[in-house]
Image (cartoon, rainbow, N blue to C red):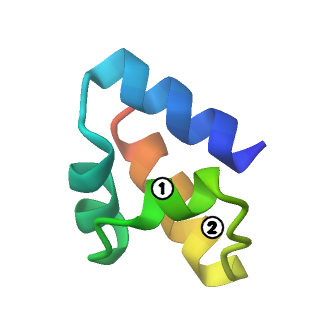
Amino acid sequence: MLLRKVEKFLRRTGMPPTSFGRAVVNDPRLVRDLRLGREPRAATVARIEAFIASREP
C-alpha cells in the first residue's frame, strides 16, 4: 500500500526515486529498499505520507 502511494507520486510528479528518498528521510535508497521489501518504521511511514500529502494538488 505505501509503496503504491510512493510509486503513484513519483509517476505523477516525475520526481526521481533518489530525490524523493533524500527529501523525505535523507536516504536516497529509500524507494529502492521499499521495492525490495523494506518495512519502514511507523515514524518513517508518517513522514512519507505527510510529504506526499503536502504536495497533493
**Which class describes the residues within 10 Å of circle 1: few (<14), some (14-19), or many (20+)?**
few
In the rendered image, the vertical position of residue 32 relative to residue 28, given as above or below: above
Q: Is residue 1 left or right of residue 4?
A: right
Q: Is residue 57 visible?
A: no
**Which secondary structure lies at badge 2?**
helix
Q: Please give left or right for residue 42 compared with residue 50 in the image.
A: right
Residue 24: x percent and y percent? 34, 65
- Label 1: which residue? 32
Q: Are marks 2 and 1 in contact (CB under 8 Å)?
A: no
Q: Residues within 10 Å of mark 2 (few under 14, many from 20)?
A: some
Give me the residue at 63% from left, 67% from top. 45
Q: Which residue is mark 2?
A: 45
Disc 2 or 1, which lies upstream in sequence? 1
Q: Quadrant of the C terminus?
A: top left
Report if residue 52 is visible in the image: yes
Residue 41 coordinates in the image, percent (x, y): 69, 82
Vertical side of 47 occupied by 15: above or below: above
Q: Residue at x 44, y 65 (%)?
A: 30
Position in image of residue 5 (x %, y %): 61, 36
The residue at 40%/20% (across/down) is 11
Looking at the rendered structure, the kind of residue marked 2 is Val
Nearest the viewer among 39 and 41 is 39
Task: Say which of 4 and 45 sits in front.
Answer: 4
Q: Is residue 14 left or right of residue 35?
A: left
Look at 67% across and 34% down and name the residue there: 4
Q: Quadrant of the N terminus?
A: top right
Judge left or right: residue 35 versus residue 57: right
Separation of residues labelled 2 and 1 (CA atoms): 15 Å
Callout 1: SS: helix
